[in-house]
Amino acid sequence: MATSGVMRPGHIQLRVLDLDESVNFYRNVLGLVETGRDAAGRVYFKAWDERDHNSVVLREAEQAGMDLMGFKVKDRATLEQLDKDLQAYGVQTERIPAGELLETGERVRFTIPTGHVMELYADKTDVGNGQPYTNPDPWIPAAEHGIAPHRFDHCLLYGPNLEDNLKLFTEVLGFHLVERVLLEDGKSLLATFISCSHKAHDLAFVAHPEPGKLHHLSFLLGSWEQVLRAADIMSMNRVSIDIGPTRHGITRGTTIYAFDPSGNRFETFCGGYETYPDHAPITWTFDEVGAGIFYHDRKLNERFLTVVT
């Protein structure tokens, strides 16, 4: 699939309760690289193998959760066209000037039917991954610092109006539906997993009455062994683990879920499969949702279903 339109998840801005504690966690336990701080008090991070300046932005607040999520688009012309397409579809957009987010160009901001704030942007400073673009080594010593994920990969978000949400992402933004979970009636959507790339999902949604909620942000690791290593590091640092290590039925990924010091859930995972827009979506029925989420136990735990920020 040629890369066009929306290319990938680019950044997430998180609310944390104690900035110093959270910076220590994301830098030393999760193993992200701090890349800057701004006049608004925000702290910027990237994963070691990401090339753009930032992918995780922390902001101190009284309530944990997600402020916004941004997606990088192919180029400036694509950004302009998608802004027009969103407006023509009836979505109100706002232009955020270049530089408001460090090393990031102008952004197009809008709110989706689930109540989440999304952004599109075309430009972000390439700071590299510590290796030259000519004759690089396969990894750098920074990759052994903390859990050290390769990249910020996707989010699972909770909110209402999943049908309208799916139409917006597939009809306007060029995503395709990869997997879905149906409610008891066999028709209504409980969850959707959508992609703008070859990945099994770049974004996922679960039906929830309260809008704008974050279930988890996810970081990619290179192997099942690295997921197990992540579990060891979490335990060594007394991180609150939600569930895992285990495997998903949906997307086939291997995974562990845990909480940052503010209660924001995060995932470290590897695996999954490649998908293409011509693939028929995979459907999970309500009676098999336990196996879909946690394939080994084939059942859900209550905290995983109900705790969101």
Image (cartoon, rainbow, N blue to C red):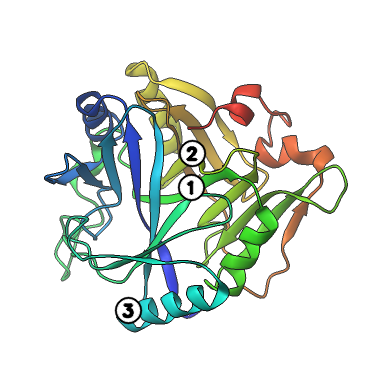
Task: Indicate which disc, 1 or 3, sits on the residue closer to the N terminus.
Answer: 3
**CB-based contact (under 8 Å), mark 1 and mark 3:** no
Rendered image: mark on residue 155? 1
Task: Indicate which disc, 2 or 3, sits on the residue closer to the N terminus.
Answer: 3
Q: Position of residue 291 (x, y in %)?
A: 73, 37
Direction from residue 6 to residue 294 in the image, left or right: right
**Please, which residue is most extreme toward the right here?**
185
Rendered image: mark on residue 97? none
- Regarding mark 3 in the picture, which secondary structure is present there? loop
The answer to whether residue 26 of the structure is visible from this angle is yes
For mark 3, what is the residue?
Answer: 75
Work out whether residue 105 or residue 250 is closer to the camera in this orientation and state it: 105
Q: Residues within 10 Å of mark 2 (few under 14, many from 20)?
A: many
- Residue at the image point whose x is 25% and y is 70% from the top: 123
- Regarding mark 2 in the picture, which secondary structure is present there? strand
Work out whether residue 47 or residue 212 is closer to the camera in this orientation and state it: 212
- Residue at the image point whose x is 33% and y is 27% from the top: 62
Q: Residues within 10 Å of mark 1 (few under 14, many from 20)?
A: many
Q: Position of residue 235 (x, y in %)?
A: 39, 18
Q: Is residue 82 above or below residue 238?
A: below
Rendered image: mark on residue 216? 2
Amino acid beneath label 3: Asp
Amino acid beneath label 2: His
Gap in angstroms between the C-alphas marked 1 and 3: 23 Å
Amino acid beneath label 1: Cys
**CB-based contact (under 8 Å), mark 2 and mark 1:** yes
Task: Indicate which disc, 2 or 1, sits on the residue closer to the N terminus.
Answer: 1
- Regarding mark 1 in the picture, which secondary structure is present there? strand
**CB-based contact (under 8 Å), mark 2 and mark 3:** no
Work out whether residue 241 or residue 161 is closer to the camera in this orientation and state it: 161
